[in-house]
Each structure stands twice: as structure tokens, then as C-alpha cells.
Image (tube, rainbow, N blue to C red):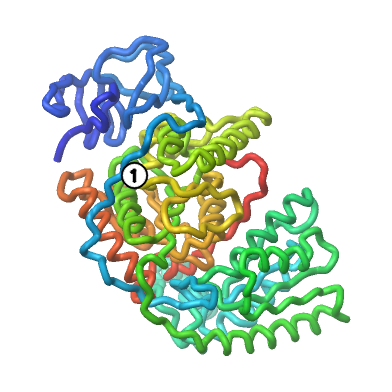
Amino acid sequence: MKPALLIDPSDNLGVALRALAPGETVDLDGTPFPISEAIPPKQKFTLAAMAIGDRARMYGVTVGVVTAAIPAGGLVTTANLKHDADGFSGTRTREHQWSPPAIDRWQGRTFDGYHRSDGKVGTANHWLVIPMVFCETRNVNAIRTAFERALGYERTTHYQRLADRLVAAYQSGADATALRELPLEKLDEVAPGRLFPKVDGIQFLNHTMGCGGTRDDAESLCGLLASYITHPNVAGATVLSLGCENAQLEILEAAIRRRCPGFDKPLLTFRQQGYPDERTLLDAAIKGTFLGLIEANEAERRPASLDHLSIGVECGGSDGFSGISANPAVGALSDRLVALGGKILLAEFPELCGVEQELVDRCVSDEVAARFTHLTSTYAARARAVGSDFSQNPSPGNIRDGLITDAIKSAGAAKKGGNSPVVSVIDYPEIAETAGLHLLCTPGGDAECTTALAGAHANIILFTTGLGTPMGNPVTPVVKISTNTELAERLPDLIDFDTGAIIRGEAGIDALGSDLLDLVIEVASGRLQTKAQQLGQADFQPWKRGVSL
């Protein structure tokens, strides 16, 4: 295992792959560099002494400016480096050259998916229950209570059984020690006894929007909900409206028609103010939903070519290894899928700060480049208008684990998109329609971004993490990828795929990217459940188009 890494020949910061001691000398591409301070794993160190005002470089781009002198081999921290990034012109400065990787391994391969009438193919088959406004949350929860356990979708029965045993033991006179020692049953990988085995789940998209706010908020929400209803992983939907909210059913229905003119899925809508009482509303909604589930259960998985895969890529709980292990491995998969005719969606615009010009140069046309420039510049301006900035994106956990500036984080985050040309730039909550790499305007927040990626019709999401997160999505399987093996071993119930072998020098980026694509095919076929699916993790957080980093 190498002690340290120089990512790009033009860099003046190195990355510690293990703890480095003062007085140690590390070899970077044949050049020795002495270490003058203790450098923990994942942290950055200087290759030469740096003075105030010097610009720090990683990944071949500017990642910060020095605010206090740093000795050669010294530790880089927030006390001596602040965010700074290269500017960008907004126009293409060179012709992007891309050599697609070899894809012989997957030629003719298929996954088993749900074929929809619009030509798209789902990797899952869900029924949605959606409130148009937060006022309907209690009614949505009533439907959840009615169905989840009765139909076999409840994922927390092992906790309920533990509570039942605690009650019984307490009533039998057990003391505190005996109560603490009661064992918790193991979570079943697949929910037992589902009445509708071909329906992967009933998903309840509760949210806090739909009224108040602006009319644009209502339009945006309806657009997102329409994108979920038309998603290839969705069989049908039950929608509850109060009746007087800003997010009217008519706005939702128009958004559905724009996204899918031939929409033919079951769509059950209920306005509470049109019913004499709540009991009558829920009676109709529950019975109608049950009949819809019977119809949804008739769906069958059939082989589909890999160009029907649309994969959203995201990172969260990132660390100092994210940009050199998990993200590049996802990038290797991205290039392979694009070469196979599939779609890749790269999101999180606040985490593309400092690599904008590279992305502009990769755009297939001036029009695509101009749209990216407009969306990211407008986003950044909104942040500055309220006294914020993209530089505030890194979380305390990111910073502790080596992502000192947003530019460092962004340069590594962009690696998830591989090297293929950018064929389009889409705004939230639009849908990716053509093959190739797309840039999707979203915040960097995990739940908002995952929600938006599924809304753009990603039928698989790849989520890299160095610190660990349970993140999932109601309709799209989320594959969690660890940057380091310590995380994969410490939180095995959260991680699906480990790229720590890259850090140890035991496996290459291309090899793990290829293995990851094989795993994705299994997940897309329903033969393998992700850890988030096993846990029933279904995060849904619409983006209210204000400032969220």
C-alpha cells in the first residue's frame, strides 16, 4: 500500500493514504517528499512550503488559497487554507475528446425489468400514495397503517416484536438487567408473506409543501410528483388532495400529460372537501388502492437491454478518499454505461464548484454549455444574495475527514460522471430523455438530491459515502458504495459495495467500476436487494427552490 498519493502532476498538495509521521519521507511518482507534521489518513499535505496568498492545487485545479504559512510536508487545515476556485468562461474553449471504454463484457447482456407502455423499463414496481398538500399527511398515514402490515410490507416488525417481549417480560417481573439482555431478532432480507409479490412496495410520499409559499413552489412540487407518477418504477398512484391548496390536482394532471402524453397508469384522485367526512374519503381511497394493487401485481419482469438503465450518481457523507476511490469507480461505470447507450445523471451543482470549465468544455454544443453556465451561475447568485456561498457546502464531517474546501470536495465529486461528453443539462424537476451524460441542477443535500435524481427518472441511484448514511428512495433502488473498507466493515447494514481496495492498491478503478456494473444489473433485475431496500429506507424531500447547498 502506498503511503500517499499525488492525484495530478500539477498538484502541490498530496493525500495521505495512511498516517504519516514527522520525519518520514514519502515517494510520489518517483520524487521524495519529507513530512514535517503528523498527517492523519485522508488529510492533505504540502509538497513545498507555501506562503499566504499561494494557490493550492489538487486534481489539476485550484482548490483553495493559503491564509497562513504552511511548511513543506505540513498539514493542510481550515486554519491555513480557505476555499478558492478557478473561474470559468461559460463558453467551450476546446473540443472534448473521449475514447469509450471496452464494453465487450456486457454486449448482449440484459436485466429483467418492468416494460412500460412509453418504452421505458423499470427496475422495480411500486404503488404510490401521495398527498398534494401537508394537510393530507394524517390521511396518508392512515392508509399506511391500514396496508403495510396487512399486505406484508412492514419492515419494522422485529422492533415491534421486541417491544412486545419487553412488555411481557416487564409484566412478568423482569428487572432492568433482564430487559436489557432481551435479544433483537434479525431483520428479514425480504418481507415475508406479501399478498402482492410482484408489487415491490407501497410508497408514501409525505412532504411539507403544497400550500403557502409561492405559485412557483406549487408548480415545482406538481412537476416532481408528476415525474414520480410517470416513473418506470411506478405502477400507479393514489393522490389525496384537500381541495383548496395551491398545488391543485389540475396542475398535477397537466404536468403528467407534458411528461407522458400517452399516460395510461391507474391514477386515483380524491379531494377531501368533496366528501362528507374523513371516514368516507378513506373508505374510498383504501378500497380503490387495493383494487389498483391487484392490477399492479399482474406485471412481469422481462429482459431489457442495458441501454434502458438510467443511473443517477451522488455522494453524501463524503471523506478525503471519496475523490480517489468510490467516485472514480462510479465514473468508470458511468463511461461504460454511456458506451452501452444508457443514461448517467450527475447532480449536486454546489459540488461542481471549480470544475465548471471542464464540464463546459465537455458539452456537446454551445447551447448545452450556455444552459449549464446559466443554471449554475444563477444558483450561485441566489446563494450570495442571502449571504451564503457554495464555499459553505462542506459539512463538519466532510471537513474533519479531509475535505477542507468546497473546491476539494467538488473536484473529487465530479469524478462520478466519468469522462464522456455532456449531452444535456436539465433543471429540477425535469426528466432525462436521451442517452448519454446529463447534468441535473440539484442541491448537494442528500435527500433533496436523491429525490430529484429519481424524479429525473433514474431507475438506479449510485451513492458514494466515506462516513456512512442510510439514505434510500421510495421508488429507485439506491446502491451505497463505501470509499474505505473500515466503513464497510463497521456499518455493513448500510453498504452494498466497497472500493477500499483502491486505497490499499489491491484493485484498480476500472476493475471495480466493472464489478459495480455487474452488481447494478443484479439490483436492476430484482435479484439483489440493496441495504436501503432491506431497511425500508425511503427518503423523500422535495426541493423548495430557495438556497440549499
Q: Is residue 505 left or right of residue 176?
A: left
Residue 460 percent across, percent down from the top left: 43, 63
Q: Is residue 134 above or below residue 174?
A: above
Q: Is residue 480 above or below residue 395?
A: below
Task: Identify which amino acid the numbered label 1 is placed on.
Answer: Asn
Q: Is residue 237 left or right of residue 457?
A: right
Residue 264 percent across, percent down from the top left: 62, 79
**Res 78 quadrant in image:** top left
Q: Residue at x 49, y 31 (%)?
A: 91
Residue 198 percent across, percent down from the top left: 47, 84
Task: Count numbered badges in the picture.
Answer: 1
Q: Residue at x 39, y 61 (%)?
A: 342
Q: Is residue 317 above or below residue 494?
A: above
Q: Residue at x 85, y 64 (%)?
A: 244
Label 1 crowd bin: few (<14), some (14–19), many (20+), radius 10 Å: many
Residue 274 visible within the image: yes
Q: Nearer the viewer, residue 49 or 340?
A: 340
Q: Quadrant of the N terminus?
A: top left
Q: Which residue is mark 1?
A: 419
Residue 170 visible within the image: no
Secondary element type, mark 1: loop
**Res 272 quadrant in image:** bottom right
Q: Nearer the viewer, residue 162 or 367?
A: 367
Q: Is residue 27 left or right of residue 85?
A: left
Q: Residue furthest left?
A: 30
**Res 7 quadrant in image:** top left
Q: Residue at x 53, y 66 (%)?
A: 474
Q: Residue furthest right?
A: 276
Q: Quadrant of the C terminus?
A: top right
Q: Is residue 425 above or below residue 104?
A: above
Residue 241 percent across, percent down from the top left: 77, 69
